[in-house]
Image (cartoon, rainbow, N blue to C red):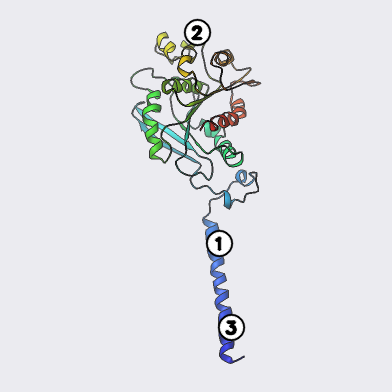
Amino acid sequence: MAAGDNRRSRRDVLLGAIGLGLAAAGCASKSTDAPVRTARTESAPGGLSPATMAPKVKPVTVERIRSMSRRTEVELVIIRPEDAGPNLPVCLALHGRDARANQFVELGVPEMLTSLVNYQGTPPFAVVAVDGGDSYWVARDDEDDPQLMLSDEVPKWLGERGLAGNPFAVLGISMGGYGALNYAANLNDPAVAAISPALFLSWPEAALRDAFADEQHWRSTDPLQNLNKVAGVPMGVWCGDADPFIDGARQLIERAKPAVSEIEPGDHEPAYWRKVLPAALKFVGTRI
């Protein structure tokens, strides 16, 4: 081999080695910038690697926003399945009494939603929760109207954040179940998932909550006295057999004849809600 050819050969080897080194450095840089996966996500079923499961957007976002209908700032919590795309349909989630929008994060909805969508074939959707106060999601006075917030303000907030503006479903826990049934009655459209719905069988019982202006106010919003407004609405009802609201839930099931109803061992507590939330989320997911 000529000397020139030998030099070119050595140069080619060196350039090739440098190129490989730069490529390796580039890969290391990309790996460093990749989202950090938690042990929980890395152990997800299906044999997917952390890289292939990286979310396109944050699965959970929390922000504070001014509600004109409630005359206060509220927390808006958006829960998406991991690796979700844009324009997701939305299921509203209404919290219980003495709770806030983050109740659904605390109960594990982010993990449940990702499991349902990514591993169980449920169509992708987002769960959106917002602070509704403690008045059973009804307007006690003109200064605080959570139902007006849900119907008039929330769709705009959703659209501004790249989500479908009109929720296809509403899910509620305890007091939120009362609110979810009212929301569906007002719109006569979205599917309803009511978990441990706080339903009262008499005015004295309802009056103890100090949430209604008077008996007429309660009667006009009580789901059991306005079931005609949710006739034909896809509905699922879940309640524990030791729940103090079990009688109201049984009456709802008997009279409304929901598509899905489950009475099983459980109390009015987070442990029961965590147990049935996957079924409730799957139910609304089939109604998209």
Q: Secondary structure at mark 3?
A: helix
**Badge 3 amino acid:** Arg
Nearest the eye: 237 or 135: 237
Callout 3 touching callout 1 (CB < 8 Å): no
Callout 1 touching callout 2 (CB < 8 Å): no
Q: Position of residue 26 (x, y in %)?
A: 53, 64
Q: Secondary structure at mark 2?
A: loop
**Is residue 228 placed above or below 49 in the rendered structure?**
above
**Badge 1 amino acid:** Ala
Residue at the outermost front position: 232
Nearest the eye: 271 or 180: 180
Q: Position of residue 54 (x, y in %)?
A: 55, 49
Nearest the eye: 77 or 1: 1
Name the residue carrying label 2. 202
Is disc 1 surrounded by few (<14), some (14 to 19) or many (20+) residues within 10 Å?
few
Cα–Cα gap, marks 3 and 1: 27 Å
Residue 28: mark in rendering:
1
**Is residue 112 placed above or below 94 in the rendered structure?**
below
Cα–Cα gap, marks 2 and 3: 93 Å
Is disc 2 surrounded by few (<14), some (14 to 19) or many (20+) residues within 10 Å?
few
Callout 2 touching callout 3 (CB < 8 Å): no
Q: Position of residue 157 (x, y in %)?
A: 38, 35
Instruction: Of the two numbered discs 3 and 1 on the same chain, state the one appearing first in sequence.
Output: 3
Identify the residue at horizontal 59%, vertical 87% (top origin). Answer: 6
**Is residue 43 placed above or below 185 in the rendered structure?**
below
Q: How many marks?
A: 3
Identify the residue at horizontal 53%, vertical 54% (top origin). Answer: 34
Cα–Cα gap, marks 1 and 2: 66 Å
Identify the residue at horizontal 54%, vertical 57% (top origin). Answer: 32
Relative placement, left or right, of 1 versus 68 is right
Residue 10: mark in rendering:
3
**Badge 2 amino acid:** Ser
